[in-house]
Structures are given as C-alpha cells and as structure tokens.
C-alpha cells in the first residue's frame, strides 16, 4: 500500500505511481473525499471557484463590427 509522510507544514508528497495512476501533473489539484469516518479517498480535483483558469475556453474570433485589413 502506498504511503506518504506529513511534513512539519502539513504537506504530503503523493508517490509517483499514484500521481501517474490519477493522471496528475504539476499544478493539478486533488480532492479528499470522506468515504467513512476517518477514511478518505483522493480524486482528481475539479478546481476551485477562486481559480477558474481553464473553465472557459479561449474563443478565437473578432468582435462584431470589427474587420481585419489584409
């Protein structure tokens, strides 16, 4: 069973094979879901409302009324 140590600051490092299985990359978030009292599951995070980066796709169009000169 994979394990991790909690640092003085309360941080943990997920083992590399766990990150690979979850498809996690640097900057990704994870959620801790309580499955029963005192037991949690780790899932890939959906992001936070405070960090909406990537939620809305970048649109590639010119606003109406603007024409580009070639």
Image (spheres, rainbow, N blue to C red):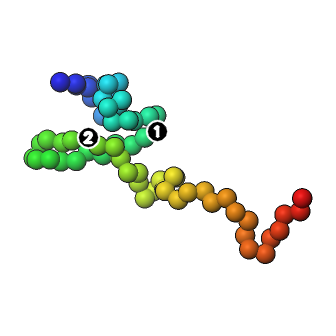
Residue, x 67% and y 58% (percent of image)? 60
Residue, x 38% and y 51% (percent of image)? 46
Q: Which of 32 and 8 is in front in this view?
A: 32
- Seen in the picture, residue 41 relative to 17 is either above or below; the reply is below
Q: Which residue lies furthest to the right in this view?
A: 70
Disc 2 is placed on an element classified as strand
Between discs 2 and 1, the one toward the N terminus: 1
Image quarter of residue 4: top left
On the question of residue 42 being in view, the answer is yes
Can you tell which mark lies on residue 68? none
Q: Which residue lies furthest to the left in this view?
A: 37
The location of residue 22, given as percent across then percent down, is 33, 36
> What residue is pinned by disc 2?
42
Image quarter of residue 8: top left
Q: How crowded is mark 1: few (under 14 residues within 10 Å), some or many (20 or more)?
A: few
Alpha-carbon span between mark 2 and mark 1: 16 Å
The location of residue 16, given as percent across then percent down, is 35, 24
The location of residue 10, given as percent across then percent down, is 30, 34
Residue, x 51% and y 52% (percent of image)? 54
Can you tell which mark lies on residue 27? 1
Whether the residues at callouts 2 and 1 have beta carbons within 8 Å, the answer is no
**How many circles with numbers are drawn on the protein?**
2
On the question of residue 9 being in view, the answer is no
Residue, x 70% and y 63% (percent of image)? 61
Q: Which of 15 and 60 is in front in this view?
A: 60
- Seen in the picture, residue 9 relative to 58 is either above or below; the reply is above
Q: Quadrant of the N terminus?
A: top left
């Amino acid at each position: 069973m994979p394990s991790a140590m909690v640092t003085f600051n309360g941080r943990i490092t997920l083992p590399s094979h766990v990150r690979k299985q979850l498809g996690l990359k640097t900057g990704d978030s994870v959620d801790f879901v309580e499955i029963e009292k005192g037991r949690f599951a780790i899932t890939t995070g959906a992001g936070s409302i405070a960090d909406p980066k990537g939620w809305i796709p970048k649109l590639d169009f010119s606003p109406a009324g603007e024409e580009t000169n070639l």
